[in-house]
Structures are given as structure tokens and as C-alpha cells.
Amino acid sequence: MTRWHPDDLGGRLLASADGWRVVRLPALAEPGDPLGRAEGEALWPEWEGREALLRKQAILGERAFAALFQQVPRAAEGGMFRTGRIVMAQQAEAGGVRAWDLAASSGAGADWTVGLRLVRRADGGFVVADVVRARAEPAAVEALVRRTAERDGPGVVIGLPQDPGQAGRAQVGWLTRAVAGHRVVATAETGSKVLRAQPVAAQVNAGNLSVLDAAWAPVFLEELADFPGGVKDDQVDALSRAFGLLVEQGRGARAMAGGVMGR
């Protein structure tokens, strides 16, 4: 069947039931091909060869080709985020910013509260140094934000989303009080998730982002690869906010240096 989304009919059947035998013969062979083909070999070359399929891939784009010809809801390397270009870092980086994407439910299918710490390296690249996630009620979310801030130390700037209206301002207020002694920056949610993710996706696709090789990394990379068609995007939202904060920090530092030099 054609797979356009991880949460489509096929995805739900595979996630909710045991005993299914999956037969998937992609047009271009992948590693571990059930027919023993070499990677990239066409399924029926007498009918449509590898070069013809690659031309279709270039015309359709990665996501459509993966759905129509590979029977997967995304390309193996990812759609908006080319996760194959991410290098795994072996050493944790200190400092940076910790951006949060907040949820307020502990249900099994609820969104995740995510706190992601992003660091800018001396060479200008970026490192995702830590990700914490929880499905929790508001009181437990507050405790998680406070514990994480204590672990990070006062040098790590905390980024919080501020939804419009009084409730959003109140949420930022009580979380800011919970992390007294830390610098907190609240940013409004403007534009679509895809639009907000584009700047950091450009860095990923240029090979300028690394991810710490940690237990949380596989789930994080999977969400990036699925975006924007995946089931969850909380980690992507946190990454977008963290990147925006780091960029603004860099602009502020350059402006201050320019002012000092000007005087």
C-alpha cells in the first residue's frame, strides 16, 4: 500500500496488532532486501530500470517517491531534516540554551513536554547536547523545569514559549519564579511549525548540526526525520526555539562588540 503518514491505516495496524507478516518490496532496494538485491537495484529492471526510477525521484521529491515507490511514509534520510547529514558527537558540550516545548497532560497519547539544550561550537556549528521529555501534569512539569535548570546551572539560558492571552502569560510567570536565579527568555509562538523549523533545518542539511550519542538520540532523530509528517513534533519545536535563542544571542554579542569598538 502507499504510505503517506506514519499514523495511517497501515501504521495503526502494525502498532496495535501482533502476528502481521509484512511484505514490502521497494522499487529501489534497501539494505537487507528480502529478495537479496544490492542496495539501489531496481525491483523490475526490464520494466523500469534504476535510472528511470531516479529520474522519477528527482521529479517527485523524496517524500512522494518514498510513499509511492518505497512504501514508507518518508524517505530514509528524512524530508525537511536530512538526518543522514547529522554527525553523532561523543562528548557532551557545556553551556548553551535550554528551550522548552510545554504540554500539560500525562495521558498515553498526549504531547510531550520537551527541554532541549543546544550549544554553539567554537567553529560555528551546533550541538544538541541534551534532551529531556515527560508526559506530565502542570505541577510535575514545573518540577522538571526546575530540576533541569539546577542541573544545567545559571549559565544556561532558559527559553519558554508564551502562548497569547492571559493563560500564556501566567504560565511563563510561574515557571520563571520556579527557576529564580536563571535568565529566562519567553518567545511568542508565531507562524507555522514548518516555518519556525526552516532556519535550523537549513543548518542540519548543510551538515552543521551534531547530536550527542546518548540514549535519547534515536527517538530525537526519528522525530526529525518524520517531520512534518510525523505523529509528534514536540522535540522539533524545542529545537527551533533553542536555535532562535542562540542566533539572537549571537546577534546581541556582535552588536555589543560593535558598540564598544565604535566608542
Image (spheres, grey):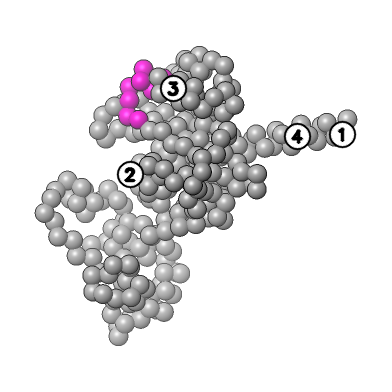
**Quarter of the image where one finds residue 1:** bottom left
Label 4, label 1: how many angstroms apart (C-alpha)?
A: 10 Å
Q: Are marks 4 and 3 in contact (CB under 8 Å)?
A: no
Task: State the CA–CA distance, disc 3 to disc 2.
Answer: 28 Å
Local SS, label 2? loop
Is residue 203 visible in this depiction of the protein? yes
Q: Position of residue 194 (x, y in %)?
A: 47, 45
Q: Amino acid at mark 3?
A: Arg
Mark 2 or mark 4: name the one nearer the start of the chain: 2
In this rendering, the label closer to the viewer, 2 or 4: 4
Q: What residue is disc 2 on? A: 231
Q: Amino acid under label 2?
A: Val
The answer to whether marks 1 and 2 mark residues whose Cβ atoms lie closer than 8 Å is no
Q: Callout 1: few (<14), some (14-19), or many (20+) C-alpha neighbours within 10 Å?
A: few
Q: Which residues are magenta?
A: 134-142
Label located before the other in sequence (4 or 1): 4
Q: Which residue is mark 1?
A: 262
Disc on res. 147: 3
| Whole-number angstrom distance, CA of label 4 to CA of label 3 | 33 Å
Q: Nearer the viewer, mark 1 or mark 2?
A: 1
Marks 3/1: CA–CA distance:
42 Å
Reply yes or no: does residue 201 show up in magenta. no
Picture mark count: 4
Q: Earlier in the sequence, mark 3 or mark 2?
A: 3
- Residue 65 higher or lower than 150, as above or below: below
Locate residue 68, reporting x and y percent: 32, 65
In this view, the residue farthest toward the bottom is 46
Question: Among all residues in the image, which is located at the extreme front?
Answer: 91
Whole-angstrom CA distance, mark 2 to mark 4, is 40 Å
